[in-house]
Image (spheres, grey):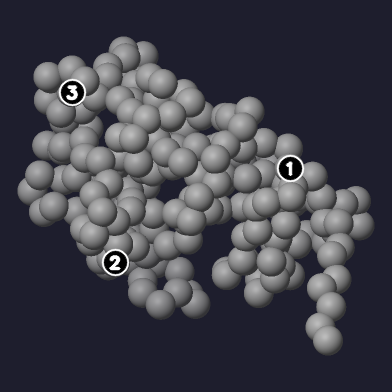
Amino acid sequence: MSYTVQTEIGTVVSLWRYPVKSMLGEELRVAQVRDHGLRGDRAYGLVDSTDGKVATAKNPRKWPNLFAFGATFLDPSGNTAQVPPVRITLPDGDIITSEQSDCNQTLSKALKREVTLAATARGSVSQSEEYWPDMEGLDHRDTVTDFPLPTGTFFDCATILLLTTATLNRLRDFYPQGRFEVQRFRPNIVVEPVATAPSFVENAWIGQTLAIGDEVRLRITG
């Protein structure tokens, strides 16, 4: 007979959703967790009209100001069969919606690159890209590589990203001048770990199952 041992590791302190890939998102009071992540998370992406690749902050040379855009759903509840329209705040403070006929034109002007705002499509496989800085120990150096996104999504890899407040605080200790804000790491769930947790405690959770409340169970893969 096998037994499951549960250990309290911390408390969920915030939930986040990012309606448009690589834009700033919205903090939630409640969220629906599905097999493919939080409902509405990365529901939209910007597709480069030149090469068909999905825009990502992982290539800051090509997309230097994606983090200056913010996105929220017009219907925050998301209780619709289809992906609800999205409201986008531009770097200059102007606001547009995905329902506007000039949405793509306005986004293209702001990004200085022709793009199309697209919703995820079941069964489709999109490509994105990542810039690798010139640093020792990386698989590539000072180059850009392509990678496929999981089928039918705009996620880079896993469908839910978890981050602890302990890791953010440790990074601030390492580099006090830096801006280690939650949204820049794109987490969906932020956990405040127990006081005895070591730095970068998330690494110790790989291969384990995280239980949140009575229903949510997340397998930590990396």
The residue shown at (30%, 35%) is 82
Q: Residues within 10 Å of mark 1 (few under 14, many from 20)?
A: some
Q: Are marks 1 and 2 in contact (CB under 8 Å)?
A: no
Q: Residue furthest bottom?
A: 1
119 up-or-down from 129: above or below: above
Marks 3 and 1, how far apart at CA = 36 Å
Residue tagged 3: 103
Picture quadrant of residue 190:
top right
Residue tagged 2: 147
104 up-or-down from 136: above or below: above
Numbered disc 2: secondary structure: strand
Q: Name the residue type under label 3.
A: Cys
Measured from the top left, where is residue 211 in percent x and y? 72, 57
Picture quadrant of residue 138:
bottom left
Residue tagged 1: 12
Q: Nearer the viewer, mark 3 or mark 1?
A: 1
Label number found at residue 174? none
Q: Residues within 10 Å of mark 3 (few under 14, many from 20)?
A: some
Compare marks 1 and 2 and give the one earlier in the sequence. 1
Compare marks 3 and 2 and give the one earlier in the sequence. 3
Compare marks 3 and 1 and give the one earlier in the sequence. 1
In the image, 24: left or right of 61?
right
123 up-or-down from 40: above or below: below
